[in-house]
Image (cartoon, rainbow, N blue to C red):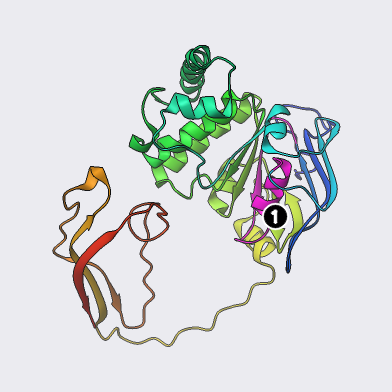
Amino acid sequence: MSAANKTAAGRPPGTPPIVLLRGICKYFPGVVANQSIDLEVLSGEIHALLGENGAGKSTLMNILTGIYQPDAGEIIVDGYAKAFASPVEAIAAGIGMVHQHFKLVMPFTVAENILLANRSSAYRSGIREIRAAIKKQSDELGFALDPDRRVHTLSVAQQQQVEIVKVLVGGAKILILDEPTAVLTDAEAEQLLATVQRLARAGTTVVLITHKLNEVKRYADSVTIMRRGKTVATVDPSTTTAAELTQLTVGETQTLPARAQGEATGTRLNVGAQFFNVLNHPNFAQPISDISSPLFGLIDGTVSTPTSIFGNGLGGDASPRIIQLKGTFQF
């Protein structure tokens, strides 16, 4: 069954999409971010946007949520033409986005962060209302969020849950998730996507920005592939192979030349760290690691990629910290 004939939440064929983008264009100096983009998203489905980094996925959703304004094209939401000047207008229309880099005030509590995005005229009355709304929404999603806990004490996965609850408490019926599993462990990612799937089956429309084929195959009802700022195709992931999705994502593929086989001649690089300390963080007044063995090594004829979750020390943590490092580099 093709994606064109597939419906979500049991809606009959011919039901108009809840989101319809026509001919969307967005240009930055020297860059064509989006070129004549067409996109249809059905109510109650998980619609994946699949593409490599720089394909224009996030830019397109930033246009839908009012962060950017399109240079050309039309936005239709639930049958009505829209022109969002800001995210405030988008959330008022029921569209909310959880960005890859969270937009939270770390010293504030969960409730205070969510209140900031859903302001009440009376702070005290508002905070009571927000606490109740957080508990209700968290219970429905299976999250265990304490409204009075400060955000900087939460794990990355819990901070993401705060972002999701914040958007849903604000009344979003269309939830956009930008690379939501990029900062999660495999177990956390599976738990999150299962929750998102339940949300969609309950009627929330989800747009899932991703570059991970396994997420598309397992959780998406339909997928639009983007490449170099353009839409390539919209297909049914259940009837499209991973190889076909890959070819749509990257274009024509080439067979890589075989590497000459040979024995590894030994370790070329060892990186070891016996001690490091975060100097200016109150929670880390003492050394937080004491590693006597090498962190990783490079062997002749191999490619080795250190991998970690965001904030685990291999790059990507934008927190203002000063690191004192002692260790060894052996060649």
Q: Quadrant of residue 205?
A: top right
| Residue most extreme to the front | 122
Side of 279 where 165 appears, left or right = right
Residue 40, above or below 148: below
Tell me where residue 299 appears, x and y as whole percent. 30, 79
Residue at 47% over, 23% down: 138
Secondary structure under the numbered disc 1 in the rendered image: strand
Nearer to the camera, 162 or 109: 109
Residue type of the residue flagged with mark 1: Ile
- Would you name the residue on which mark 1 appears? 225
Tell me where residue 83 appears, x and y as whole percent. 81, 39
Nearer to the camera, 238 or 33: 33
Residue at 76% over, 47% down: 69
Tell me where residue 107 appears, x and y as whole percent. 39, 35
Magenta stretch contains residue 130:
no
From this viewpoint, is residue 142 visible?
no
Residue at 61% over, 25% down: 170
From this viewpoint, is residue 246 visible?
yes
Side of 172 where 83 appears, left or right = right
Residue at 27% over, 51% down: 280
Q: How many marks?
A: 1
Residue 247, above or below 99: below
Residue 164, above or below 75: above
Q: Quadrant of residue 149?
A: top left
Quarter of the image where the C terminus is located: bottom left
Quarter of the image where the N terminus is located: top right
Q: What span is colored magenta in the figure? A: 42-66
Residue 186, above or below 145: below
